[in-house]
Image (cartoon, grey):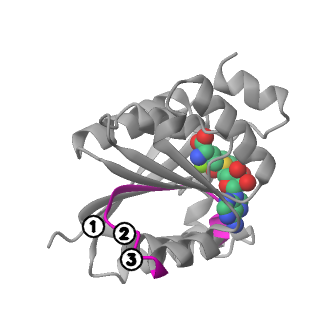
Amino acid sequence: MGALAANAAAGLPPIDVSAAQGRMLQLFALMVGARRILEVGTLGGYSTLWLTQALPADGRLVTLELEPHHAAVARRNLDAAGVGGRVDIRVGPAVATLATMIAAREGDFDLIFIDADKPSNVAYLQAALALARPGATIIVDNVVREGAILDPDHSDPRVTGTRALFDAVKAEPRLLATAIQTVGAKHWDGFLLARVLPA
Ligand code: SAH
Ligand code: DHB
Ligand code: MG
């Protein structure tokens, strides 16, 4: 059974990246030669699977997930695909996991993909900056939301959290960033693409 079918059978919400976005993540990771990848928001590991396809044999991916059930499904999907040995799934609220990683100096990630609870996007960006190597790539999912992101009075915390992310990126001199809107299997949305200032 493929990962998406396994996710559906296990009752996970169908909010994985689309196949086209998955290929895009794989391409970005290949283009930057990523050897260490950090993901925030695992779900069933579908985006994780795409990113692992870009890793060299000794590459590693750390992915953070709040829900133990999601992490268990992801573990099965990654093991079934034969890439489980390169993926470390850490269960718990990602803000706390990231703080632990920063304290342990687990830095030097080449690429960081942020795709979890949107109200925490600013906290995730700050942690990503602390864990990124100079010149690293940061990608944030779901930053357009059918254009809702343009509305300064929107009440959805997923929208206000992402608007706050744009403000934080604008104010951050260590980042060179843009946003790209996409349309396709997952409707109208987009992603933020940023590069951490090189050394
Ligand atoms: N990247 C996945 C989709 C992630 S969906 C893919 O494309 O395949 C968002 C995930 O973030 C969900 O599994 C949800 O449980 C998780 N999540 C929500 N809040 C979180 C938090 N505070 N810490 C870590 N993960 C969280
Ligand atoms: C939602 C989250 C996602 O990561 C996504 O790709 C689509 C929707 C959501 O929380 O609604
Ligand atoms: Mg997403």
Mark 1 or 2, closer to the camera: 2
Q: x, y percentage for residue 11?
A: 85, 35
Residue type at numbered disc 3: Ala
Judging depth in this view, the residue of 150 and 124 nearest the camera is 124
Task: Determine which residue is flagged by label 1.
Answer: 133
Identify the image quadrant of residue 134.
bottom left
Residue 41 lies, with reference to residue 169, above or below; the image says: above
Q: Secondary structure at mark 2?
A: loop
Q: Residue at x 40, y 30 (%)?
A: 53
* Label 3 – label 1 distance at C-alpha: 8 Å
Residue 31 in view of the camera: yes
Q: Which mark is residue 130?
A: 3
Q: Which mark is residue 107?
A: 2
Residue 92 relative to residue 178: left or right: right
Residue type at numbered disc 2: Gly
Q: Secondary structure at mark 1?
A: strand
Q: Is mark 3 within 8 Å of ligand 1?
A: no
Q: Is residue 148 magenta?
A: no
Give the residues in magenta. Answer: 103-119
- Residues tagged 1 and 2 counted as in contact (Cβ below 8 A): yes
Quadrant for the N terminus in the image: top right
